[in-house]
Amino acid sequence: MAVSDTSKVNELLKNLSELESLSVQIGILGKSGSDVLKIAGVHEFGCDIPVTDKMRGFFAYNFGVHLKADTKVIKIPERSFIRTSFDSNQGKISLKGADLIDMVMQGQMSARAFYELLGQTCVQAIQDFISSNKVSPSNTAFTIANKGSSTTLVDTGGLIGSITYEVK
């Protein structure tokens, strides 16, 4: 009587090796120094902008706003949309990841497909977080009046449209 191996250990090891060889990056994946990457960084981490005479003139001419003489810095507050959206969706993302990894281990999905679906899930979570106006702090009255909307981080759609993923 011959003994046959039905454990699929070799297939499991192959799938684990493939998972280990790949990764997924999620967020704004532009070139260093690109405008959208700068904007994303300012909002994700906040920024202090030194006030110059040229800036004072710009605000006065374009908005009719005269900055006080003692105003030295304009503070853009941290409006984390990547880290905070992940934190608020961590449970959902973890469950989705667990379901997908189980499919990879059972040979029902490739490691690349796992990372593709996980990337799509995370991108959607970030975009939904922004579009549902969960980003805080909310816009100032000045910003709302100038852009015509109270939805934080949504103006032209450029930022939200730049959120993506890449499997490497």
Image (cartoon, rainbow, N blue to C red):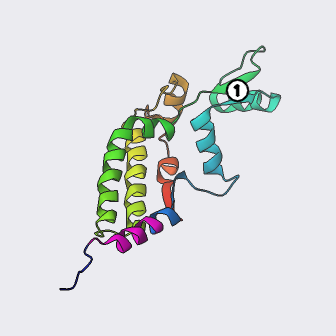
Residue found 32% across the figure and 43% down from its top: 92
Q: In this view, does 60 lie to the left or right of 26?
A: right
Q: Where is residue 165 in the image (x, y as percent from the top left)?
A: 49, 58
Assign the N terminus to one quadrant of the image. Answer: bottom left
Please tell me which residue lies in front, 14 or 101.
14
Residue 25, placed above or below residue 69 = below
Number of numbered callouts drawn = 1
Please tell me which residue lies in front, 124 or 59.
124
Q: Position of residue 139 (x, y in %)?
A: 50, 27
Assign the C terminus to one quadrant of the image. Answer: bottom right
Residue 77, placed above or below residue 127 = above
Residue 82, placed above or below residue 118 = above
Residue found 51% across the figure and 23% down from its top: 141
- Residue position marked by numbered label 1 in the rendering: 60
> Circle 1: is it few (<14), some (14-19), or many (20+) Cα within 10 Å?
few
Q: Visible in this render: residue 22? A: no
Q: In this view, does 71 lie to the left or right of 76?
A: right
- State which region is magenta: 7-17
Residue found 80% across the figure and 29% down from its top: 52
Q: Position of residue 25 (x, y in %)?
A: 53, 55
Q: Where is residue 89 in the image (x, y as percent from the top left)?
A: 37, 39
Secondary structure under the numbered disc 1 in the rendered image: helix
> Mark 1 belongs to which amino acid?
Ala
Please tell me which residue lies in front, 148 or 133.
133
Q: Is residue 5 left or right of residue 150?
A: left
Q: Main secondary structure of the magenta part?
A: helix
Residue 67 is inside the magenta segment:
no
Please tell me which residue lies in front, 111 or 72.
111
Residue ranking furthest to the right:
53
Using the rendered view, name the quadrant where residue 63 is placed: top right
Residue ranking furthest to the bottom:
1
